[in-house]
């Protein structure tokens, strides 16, 4: 991700204006899965984007939205569609990129970790394109809240063009457990308590947005950042 012009400031003022307008309601969290124990805090210090991440859009985009998500979270299912809208609007010209990381909250969704591992198997077998195809299809077919039959995971792999037997072997090996566990630990350590939890990255700065925000809200945040490119830092979106 390029350093480019830094963002400071007035951006906090711009973000405050969005908050006052009622665009972001994070304190009540009506649009995220119930929280883990403890209070949420400002999210800072999650790992920077690397070649190992699942990226949709230009990895050198000015704004990178890192989503920590749970495949069985109904709010994540809704927000997944919202983020596709964001990429359709801002990804094609390289302004915004979307990174997907895992945050399976097993206390709520016992199947989510296995589904996260399944998506990593898809990536192993078919690369970044296969990961996104698998994630899209998984969110499409799951009723959410642990109501997906895990026996369908290999079928989904086959539907997106992967070798079913190779996928089943990968999933049975549980070799992607460490990846999923690390991403979970990263976001919990950084203050994440519910899903979806998003970290906006601009240059070396990070700010968090909790919950399944609407496209209108995401658009306001993005436009605020794009329109303040001569300043430094990014606003605390809370």
Image: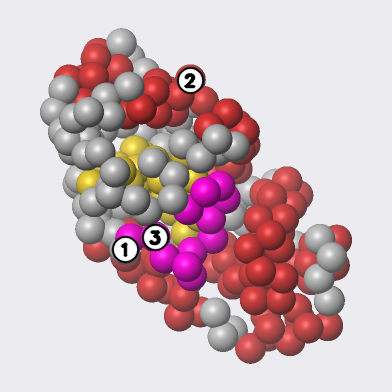
Residue assigned mark 2: 216
Circle on res. 47: 1
Is residue 199 rendered magenta in the image?
no
Q: Residue at x 45, y 80 (%)?
A: 178
Instruction: Tell me if mark 2 has few (under 14), some (14-19) or many (20+) residues whose alpha carbon lies within 10 angstroms of its own.
Output: few
x%, y% of residue 207?
26, 42
> Separation of disc 3 and disc 1 at Cα?
6 Å
Residue at the farthest front position:
4
Q: Secondary structure at mark 1?
A: loop
Which circle, 2 or 3, is nearer the viewer?
Answer: 3
Circle on res. 77: none
**Of the residues under marks 2 and 1, which one precedes in the sequence?**
1
Q: To which quarter of the image does residue 36 belong?
A: bottom left
- Contact between marks 3 and 1 (CB within 8 A): the answer is yes
Specify start and end residues of the magenta stretch as a single range: 48-59
| Number of callouts | 3
Residue assigned mark 3: 49
| Side of 48 where 232 appears, left or right | left
Q: To which quarter of the image does residue 74 belong?
A: top right
Residue at the farthest left position:
9
> Separation of disc 2 and disc 3 at Cα?
25 Å
């Amino acid at each position: 991700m390029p350093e480019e012009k830094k963002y400071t400031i007035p951006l906090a003022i711009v973000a405050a204006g969005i908050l006052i307008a009622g665009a972001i309601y994070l304190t009540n969290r009506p649009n995220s899965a119930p929280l883990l124990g403890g209070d949420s805090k400002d999210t800072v210090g999650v790992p920077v984007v690397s070649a190992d991440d699942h990226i949709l859009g230009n990895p050198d985009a000015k704004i990178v939205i890192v989503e920590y998500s749970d495949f069985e979270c109904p709010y994540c299912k809704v927000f997944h569609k919202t983020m596709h809208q964001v990429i359709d609007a801002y990804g094609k010209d390289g302004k915004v990129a979307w990174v997907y990381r895992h945050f399976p909250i097993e206390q709520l969704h016992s199947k989510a970790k296995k589904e996260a591992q399944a998506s990593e198997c898809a990536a192993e077998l078919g690369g970044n394109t296969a990961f996104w195809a698998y994630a899209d299809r998984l969110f499409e077919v799951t009723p959410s809240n642990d109501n997906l039959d895990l026996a369908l995971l290999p079928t989904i792999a086959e539907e997106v063009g992967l070798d079913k037997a190779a996928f089943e072997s990968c999933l049975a090996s549980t070799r992607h457990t460490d990846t999923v566990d690390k991403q979970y630990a990263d976001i919990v350590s950084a203050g994440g308590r519910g899903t979806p939890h998003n970290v906006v990255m601009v240059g070396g700065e990070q700010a968090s947005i909790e919950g399944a925000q609407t496209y209108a809200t995401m658009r306001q945040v993005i436009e605020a950042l794009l329109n303040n490119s001569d300043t430094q830092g990014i606003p605390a979106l809370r």
